[in-house]
C-alpha cells in the first residue's frame, strides 16, 4: 500500500475521533448562506494521481502487470476444463513438467481474431454516429456534452451516444438470433477462449500506444503526469485525456464501448449456450442477465454524468484503464454467466427473491446517491434533498493553472450517512450477482471480492486526492461524516 494512503488513513482516523469544533461547525453552511472555509497552501495541480513512486507501489505495479493477465487465463481454464473448480488446474498437476497448463490454454484462432476485430471496428464506426436518442427521449442527456475542468484548466467536448449504440447493437443481435441467422447467438461463448488472446493483445497495444503518444504527441501536455518510473507511468497512464483528432476520446471509447456494450451481449450469448446445451435457461442465468442489464443500461443512460466520475476526470489513461477495459471487464465482470453455462444452477423461489431484493435495493442506493451529488452540484446547492435545503461545506482549491476555484461538499442526504454510500450500493448489487450462482464454487464470488478491494482502495485513493485538493476543508468534511462505507463500522 502506498505510504500516502497510510498517511491519509491516519489523518482520517484522527479526524474521526476528534469532535467537531466550533470553528469547523461554522464552515458547514446551509444552502442560503455559504461561506468559504479557511485557506490552505496546496501547490497548483498537486492533487490527482501520484507524482512519486515508492518501492511498495513499484512492486505492486510490476506484480499486476505480470499476474493480472495470468489470473484471467487461469479463471478461464478452471471453467473450460475443470467445471469452474479453482483448485482443479493445480490438483491436476501429476508431477510432469510445470508448463502442463500451457498446453490446456485456448488457441488464438483466426475465427476469434475475425470476431474480435470486427467488433472493435463496429464500435469505432458506431462511436461517430451522431446521437438521435436525446431528441426522442427528452430526459436523456446525449449528443455533444461538455466534460469536467481538468487540473490544467482544460474542458473538452464529448460525443455521448452510448445508449444509442447499446440499443442498436442489441436490436441487431436479436434480429440475427431469431431472423437473419447469419451467425450463432452463442458466437461469443464459442470463441471465448480465442477472444481472450485477442482482447489481451489489443489491451497491451492500446496501453503501449497511449504511453508512446503521451511522450511524442500528447493531446494536452499540461495535463500529463510523469512520475519518472516507467512501469508506474505505463500502468497508471501519463495523459489525462488522450485523443486522436478532435473527437476520438480514448477514455470514453474504451471505458464504455467495446467492453460495456459487450457485457450484456456476452451474458446473452451465455444464456443462449445454456439453452443449446440443456434445452432450458435457468432462473439463475435469467437473474444474472437482468441484474447486469440494469447496471449496464444505467451506465449508458447516465453516460454524460459519467464524464464527471473518477475514471474520466482524474485517472490517467494507461494499462490500468486500457487493458482493464479490454480484458478485465469483459472477462471477469461476466464470470457469473460463464460459470452458469458449466453449472446450470436452479434456485429456489426464496433464494431468487432474496437475490432480487438485494440486487434492486443495492442498485437503488447506488443510483440515488450518485443522483443526489449530481443534482446538488448542478444546482450549485440551490435544491431540495430529502425534503430540506442541503447543508454543505464550501471549499477552495487551486488548479494547476494557478487559478483559485471553489467547490461544495454535500453533507445532507446519503452524503451525510457515509462518504461513499454509492460504493456501498454498488457492493450490495455485486454481492447479489454472486449469490445468484448458488454456493457450489468460489469462482463466481471473485467479483464481490474484487469489487470490495477495488472500491475500498478507490475510497482511500479518492480521499487522498480530495485531501490534497481541499486541505483543511476536507478535514472538516471527514469530521462531519466520519464513516466511509458502512455507518458505525468503516
Ligand atoms: P464518486 O462519484 O463518489 O466521486 C468522487 C468525487 O466526488 C470526489 O473525488 C469529489 O470530487 C466528489 N465528492 C466527494 N465527496 C463529495 C461530497 N460530499 N459532495 C460532493 N462531491 C463530493 O466516485 P467514482 O467516480 O469513483 O464512482 C462513480 C460511480 O461509479 C460509483 O457509484 C461507483 O460505485 C461506480 N464505479 C463502478 C465501478 C465498476 O467497476 N463497476 C468502478 C468504479 C466506480 P471533486 O473533485 O469534484 O470534489
Image (cartoon, grey):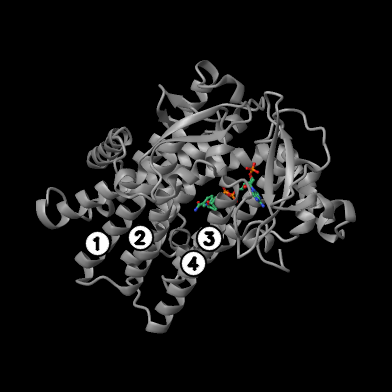
Q: Which of the two discs, 4 and 1, labels the residue nearer the N terminus?
A: 1
**Is residue 446 positioned above or below 318 on the image?**
below
Name the residue tied to disc 3: 368
Quick check: 367 left or right of 405? left
Quick check: 209 left or right of 20? left
Q: Quadrant of residue 452?
A: bottom right
- Residue contact at pointers 1 and 3, CB within 8 angstroms: no
Q: Position of residue 19 (x, y in %)?
A: 87, 60
Q: Which of the two discs, 2 and 3, labels the residue nearer the N terminus?
A: 2
Q: Quadrant of residue 245?
A: top left
Task: Look at 83% across and 41% down and name the residue there.
Answer: 38
Name the residue tied to disc 4: 442
Q: Nearer the viewer, residue 377 or 296?
A: 377
Marks 1 and 3: which is nearer the front? 3
Secondary element under disc 4, as helix, strand or loop, is loop
Q: Nearer the viewer, residue 70 or 92?
A: 70
Q: CA distance from mark 4 to mark 3?
A: 31 Å
Q: Is mark 1 within 8 Å of ligand 1?
A: no
Quick check: 461 left or right of 263? right
Q: Nearer the viewer, residue 439 or 330?
A: 330
- Residue contact at pointers 4 and 1, CB within 8 angstroms: no
Please tell me the numbered disc located at residue 273: 1
Name the residue tied to disc 2: 338
Q: Position of residue 468 (x, y in %)?
A: 74, 39
Amino acid at each position: 500500500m502506498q505510504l500516502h494512503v497510510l498517511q491519509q488513513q491516519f489523518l482520517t482516523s484522527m479526524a474521526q475521533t476528534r469532535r467537531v469544533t466550533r470553528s469547523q461547525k461554522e464552515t458547514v453552511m446551509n444552502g442560503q448562506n455559504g461561506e468559504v472555509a479557511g485557506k490552505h497552501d496546496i501547490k497548483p495541480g498537486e492533487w490527482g494521481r501520484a507524482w512519486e513512486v515508492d518501492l511498495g507501489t513499484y512492486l505492486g505495479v510490476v506484480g499486476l502487470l505480470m499476474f493480472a493477465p495470468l489470473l484471467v487465463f487461469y479463471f478461464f481454464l478452471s471453467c473450460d476444463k475443470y467445471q469452474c473448480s479453482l483448485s482443479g488446474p493445480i490438483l491436476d498437476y501429476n508431477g510432469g513438467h510445470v508448463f502442463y497448463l500451457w498446453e490446456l490454454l485456448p488457441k488464438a484462432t483466426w475465427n476469434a481474431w475475425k470476431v474480435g476485430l470486427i467488433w472493435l471496428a463496429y464500435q469505432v464506426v458506431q462511436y461517430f454516429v451522431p446521437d438521435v436518442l436525446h431528441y426522442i427521449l427528452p430526459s436523456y442527456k446525449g449528443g455533444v456534452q461538455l466534460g469536467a475542468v481538468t487540473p490544467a484548466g482544460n474542458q473538452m467536448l464529448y460525443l455521448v451516444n452510448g445508449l444509442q449504440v447499446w440499443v442498436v447493437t442489441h436490436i441487431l443481435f436479436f434480429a440475427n438470433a431469431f431472423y437473419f441467422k447469419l451467425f450463432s447467438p452463442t458466437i461469443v461463448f464459442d470463441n471465448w477462449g480465442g477472444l481472450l488472446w485477442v482482447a489481451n493483445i489489443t489491451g497491451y497495444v492500446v496501453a503501449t500506444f497511449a504511453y508512446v503518444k503521451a511522450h511524442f504527441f500528447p493531446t494536452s501536455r499540461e495535463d500529463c503526469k510523469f512520475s519518472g518510473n516507467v512501469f508506474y507511468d505505463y500502468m497508471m497512464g501519463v495523459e489525462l485525456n488522450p485523443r486522436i483528432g478532435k473527437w476520438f476520446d480514448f477514455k470514453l471509447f474504451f471505458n464504455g464501448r467495446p467492453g460495456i456494450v459487450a457485457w450484456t451481449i456476452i451474458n446473452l450469448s451465455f444464456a443462449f449456450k445454456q439453452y443449446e446445451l440443456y434445452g432450458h435457461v435457468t432462473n439463475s442465468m435469467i437473474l444474472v442477465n437482468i441484474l447486469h442489464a440494469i447496471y449496464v443500461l444505467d451506465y449508458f443512460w447516465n453516460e454524460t454524468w459519467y464524464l464527471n466520475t473518477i475514471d474520466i476526470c482524474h485517472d490517467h489513461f494507461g494499462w490500468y484503464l486500457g487493458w482493464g477495459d479490454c480484458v478485465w471487464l469483459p472477462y471477469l465482470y461476466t464470470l457469473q454467466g460463464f460459470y452458469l453455462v458449466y453449472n446450470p444452477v436452479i434456485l429456489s423461489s426464496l433464494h431468487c427473491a432474496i437475490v432480487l431484493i438485494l440486487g434492486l435495493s443495492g442498485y437503488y442506493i447506488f443510483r440515488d446517491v450518485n443522483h443526489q451529488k449530481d443534482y446538488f452540484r448542478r444546482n450549485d446547492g440551490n435544491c431540495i434533498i430529502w425534503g430540506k435545503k442541503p447543508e454543505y461545506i464550501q471549499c477552495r482549491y487551486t488548479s494547476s493553472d494557478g487559478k483559485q476555484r471553489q467547490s461544495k461538499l454535500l453533507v445532507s442526504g446519503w452524503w451525510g450517512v457515509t462518504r461513499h454510500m454509492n460504493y456501498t450500493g454498488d457492493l450490495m448489487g455485486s454481492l447479489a450477482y454472486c449469490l445468484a450462482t448458488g454456493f457450489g464454487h468460489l469462482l463466481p464470488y471473485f467479483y464481490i471480492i474484487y469489487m470490495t478491494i477495488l472500491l475500498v482502495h478507490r475510497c482511500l485513493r479518492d480521499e487522498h486526492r480530495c485531501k490534497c485538493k481541499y486541505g483543511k476543508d476536507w478535514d472538516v468534511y471527514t469530521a462531519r461524516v466520519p464513516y466511509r462505507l458502512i455507518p458505525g463500522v468503516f
